[in-house]
Amino acid sequence: MFNVYLQLNQRFKKYTFKLAVLLNFFLISNFFFFSCNSSNDKNTQTSIDSIDSLSLEKTYVDYIIIDRKVFGKEIVATGKLKAFNHSSLAFEKSGVLSTLKVEEGDRVSKGKILAQLDNRKGNQELKKAEIDIEKTNLKFLDILIGRGYDIGRQDTIPEAIIKMAKIRSGYNESLHLRENAQIEISQSKLIAPFSGLVANLKFNRYDQVPANEDFLTLIDDSYFFVEFKLIESELDQIFKNQKLKVYAFSSKKEYEAKITNINPFVDENGTIRVKAKITGDNTLAEGMNVRIILRSEVPDQFVVPKEAVLIRQDQSIIFKYTDGKAFWTYVKILNENQKQYSIIPDPEKNTARLNAGDTIIVSNNDNLAHQNQVLLFNKRIDD
């Protein structure tokens, strides 16, 4: 019995050893398997990172090939429109407004009656003056007849006699009274001195209107003057009859104008006043704000789009492309317009060079540094 026990115990130990060996082999195999996978994953990620890093090192850029050409120089200013004829109309006497024939925005013709004061008193005075003229005329003729003159042939009567008879009869005085009555009536009417638009109407019918107080504004909008200011350094770039473009902020419509006046005086702000004539239409209005552009041509210039020029260390630079790299180049701006600069190499920098045929970077240049690698992407034409 004891021998049987020993045999079973030896067999159990033998099987336990084999099981332990198999278990250890399995654990070691799995360890190497996962270790290899982890290593492959790391290698793969490293390769991807290397590729990404390589692609990020180079920047795609647009470019132009620079050459000398005519530069369209522009002077830009803002101004206000003023109508050629602009008048504030008022009654010469006070009174109650009995008739109002216009409203703001109405277009009226020269000579039209715009408004009228109550003038019953003036009409009565006119009638009385006309009656007095008839009476005094009879007295005048009686005096001439009494002196033996033929009233049918007054051209033969001495001038001194005629004058004396008119004074004694009161005829001259009655003529003067009629003239005063006519003036009184005419002053009760507000008449358009020219054709135009009614604006700034300040009174209503039956209002008491004071004498010589602005009643309304009449604007001749057939054409306007645009007034604007330029700095004194720009004076030598403008001249009388020079053409310019005017743009209304409200409609963005373009108009052509011509300089008519240049005030030969520099004010305390260092500016000069300029006036130009512009043909009007129904989109322009008195006091409208406009933008003015004066253009001139400057030959033989290096011209680049504004986005090509950057400010670094308070100086203007561009990036030139050479052999896959961006090279920092100092420049000086000579002229500008809305979209472009004309430039030259900065004369104070010995290393600054710029030649016809150079490749100039015009996009994605904000974060470039000297000798960064770049890839040319799109060539711009006529920038």
Image (spheres, rainbow, N blue to C red):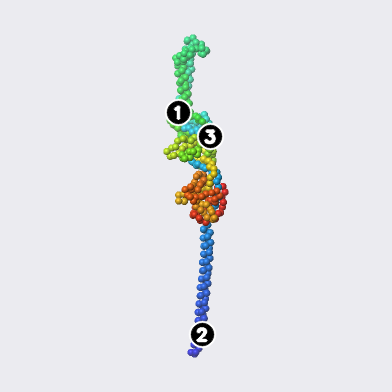
The tally of labels here is 3
Depth check, front residue: 50 or 168: 50
**Residue highlighted by disc 2:** 11
Q: Mark 1 to mark 2: distance in Å?
A: 141 Å
Q: Mark 3 to mark 2: distance in Å?
A: 124 Å
Which kind of residue does numbered mark 2 sit on? Arg
Residue at (55, 45) in percent of width and height: 69
**Residue highlighted by disc 3:** 222
Depth check, front residue: 265 or 39: 265
Between disc 3 and disc 2, whose residue precedes? 2
Q: Mark 1 to mark 3: distance in Å?
A: 28 Å
Between disc 1 and disc 2, whose residue precedes? 2
Depth check, front residue: 349 or 374: 349
Which kind of residue does numbered mark 3 sit on? Ser
Which of the two marks, 1 or 2, is nearer to us in this view? 2
**Residue highlighted by disc 1:** 92
Q: Is residue 202 left or right of residue 60?
A: left
For the residue labelled by badge 1, is the local secondary structure a helix, a strand or a loop? Answer: loop
